[in-house]
Amino acid sequence: MQIIEKANPLTDKMFQVMDELGNVVAPEFVPDWNDEKLREIYATMVFLRMADQKLIALQRQGRCGSYASIEGQEAGQVGSGLALDKKDWVFPAFRELAICYVHGAPLEKIYLYWMGNEWGSNVEVNIVPVSIPVGSHPMLAVGTAWSMKLQKKNSLTVSYFGDGATSTGDFYEAINFAGVLRVPTIFYCQNNQWAISTPRKKQTAARTLAQKAIAAGIPGIQIDGNDIFAVYAVTKEAAERAKNGQGATLIESMTYRLGDHTTSDDAKKYRDPAEVTEARKRDPILRFKLYLQKKNLWSEEFENKIIEDSKVRISVAVEKAESTPAPTQNEMFDFVFEKPTPELLEQKAFLQNLTQK
Amino acid sequence: MPILTIAEAVNLAMKQEMERDPRVMVLGEDVGRDGGVFRVSDGLMDKFGEDRVVDTPLAEAGIVGSAIGLAMGGMRPIAEIQFDGFVYPAMDYLINHAARMRTRSRGKFTCPMVVRFPYGGGVRALEHHSESMEALYVHIPGLKVVCPATPYDAKGLLVAAIRDPDPVIFMEPKRLYRSLKEEVPEEDYIVPLGKARVMIEGSDVTVVGWGAMIPVVLKAQATLAKENISMEVIDLRTLSPLDSETILESVKKTGRCVVIQEGPRTCGLAAEISAQIMEKTMKNLKAPVVRVSGFDVIPPLLKTEDFNIPDEKRLIYGIRKALA
């Protein structure tokens, strides 16, 4: 394989396996997925876009809080997620519904979190609660990867973050530590071109974000993040490198935020709608569909079935999340420390007495 | 029983905990080969190797951030920040990650880690090397804050902090690192977190202090004892969780209280203690609680730093005010 070592992060010739029209341009890197698997992955991407859009609708109806949509970023998250083992650790930022689902968070748990219930962040697999302070969590992923190296556990960590995060000092500290300590981690940057209203060109004068890896002494590679084959091939290789003791990789996954920053944002205020229209031509789901069509693996009937099935699964998840009892008033005191302090017990009792009256 | 300084007691605690538990490790700037700028981790790298005693890149946010990740991944990191004034780049990690990981994940992920650093003035150091900002850390829900004043407590409290399931800020009074010695058992013991110590019993006035202010309190106690003023001296040892019970019990007895802190006055820990006394034992108070503290100023350079740091004279002035 050796895609990563050959990559030159200084140029913006992003690594691509499938072009915008669904044509394979680098056949040697097409994953060995059979027809059934290809259709299943496509169905997952459609399902996750619908699951994402459902949260926006729920927010509009007052049934969940502010939410950051993943629309347009499905290939990066699903493709990279498929390259991980279940025991690997995922450190998401806040625009990561798809990777969390693919790695094993049940949809109802993801919904629960956005509905304002902390139990949504408590899932079986190692998915750390979403990190909202931008750029800070890649360092945690470095630390946990370091713990794996020290404990000789054969797993890795992946942090997901956006283009804005690469401007923070914490990001530099993270890639630098990862280089020095040679830890098994992947920095997965979803360069979706916008940090709320700030375009990519205002984040850095550097030609690519991937080239920031050079200063840290780790490999960096820019890839077409809307090409699920490229995403999978490169993440798989980065994961193998990590597990073989070859250290960290920075992946700059080129994509586009099709939606608003969050449900509290209106991108029309700062972004030319023509740019979005143009970006929709590179929609990762559309591209995958064109590929499947060429292989005669897609039909209207197939699409309709995915949509119908997804609607059912999504409404089950909504139902489960909405029927989950809210945390009790006591819980905010119970999880501050393993054992509550006298102050916390006093404050908890105060609130209990007050609310019983 | 060995006679140790605070610096040596901290070293012994780390050494014994690393022997006892392979998950315990030390990381920070110059903590390895150099043994730390105060030599507190001297000899640990030779004994435990470069994987467990790690000279990190010069980046405080990175040190604390990676320690959080290490702790979540099953290690028991002790992160050293070289000086009190250099913790601030790591505040984001302390507040936004370490302190709240348990709550946010409902116990799935935790941060059993210790962040140690020397604090306080009086050693004629450079700027940013003389800060006593414990109130910042005490104000953060989810962190414990410990501040020993004696070698015995330094060892016992640090062992307790390392074994604690939650993140602990461990502030070491740098002025006292080598200025006092006492017997410190080699044997395993802990000084439990959250328990203050009544160092000297008395009946006229309660004086509460911690860390580098304790020797100041003891001096004042000896001076005033000659005037038959009976001072009860409380060393807090743990600043968060606060042992209010011990303070309140004492104030109920004496009816008067002085709190001494090295840090700036406004919103300091002394203010919190004063408020709790008023809320919970006002009827026992014979006089308002008096705060003796550093001023709300930038710590002056070495020529004038002594004007800022509370000393015996200022404390005695405060005690007389409480007794008036």
Image (cartoon, coloured by chain):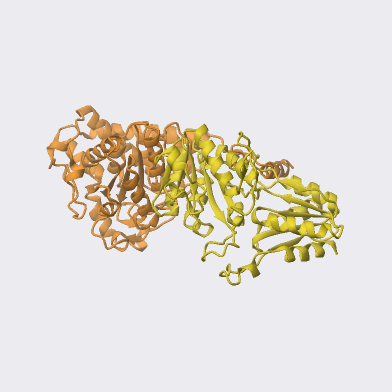
Can residue B147 be seen by looking at this rendering?
yes
Q: How many marks?
A: 0
Which residue occupies the extreme front position in the image?
B2
The image shows residue B256 at horizontal and vertical percentages of: 82, 56
User: In front: B60, or B29?
Assistant: B29
Q: Quadrant of the N terminus of chain A?
A: top left
User: In front: A250, or A356?
Assistant: A250
Q: Quadrant of the C terminus of chain A?
A: top right
The image shows residue B227 at horizontal and vertical percentages of: 86, 60
Q: Quadrant of residue B196?
A: top right
What residue is shown at x 44% (from left), y 53% (from top)?
A: B61
User: In front: B323, or A170?
Assistant: B323
- Supply the letter of whichever chain is orange: A
Report the side of B304 relative to B94 (left or right).
right
- Supply the letter of whichever chain is yellow: B
Report the side of A129 relative to A80 (left or right).
right
The image shows residue B109 at horizontal and vertical percentages of: 49, 37
User: In front: B242, or A257?
Assistant: B242
Can residue B271 be seen by looking at this rendering?
no
Which residue occupies the extreme bottom position in the image?
B303
What residue is shown at x 35% (from left), y 54% (from top)?
A: A172
The image shows residue B68 at horizontal and vertical percentages of: 47, 44
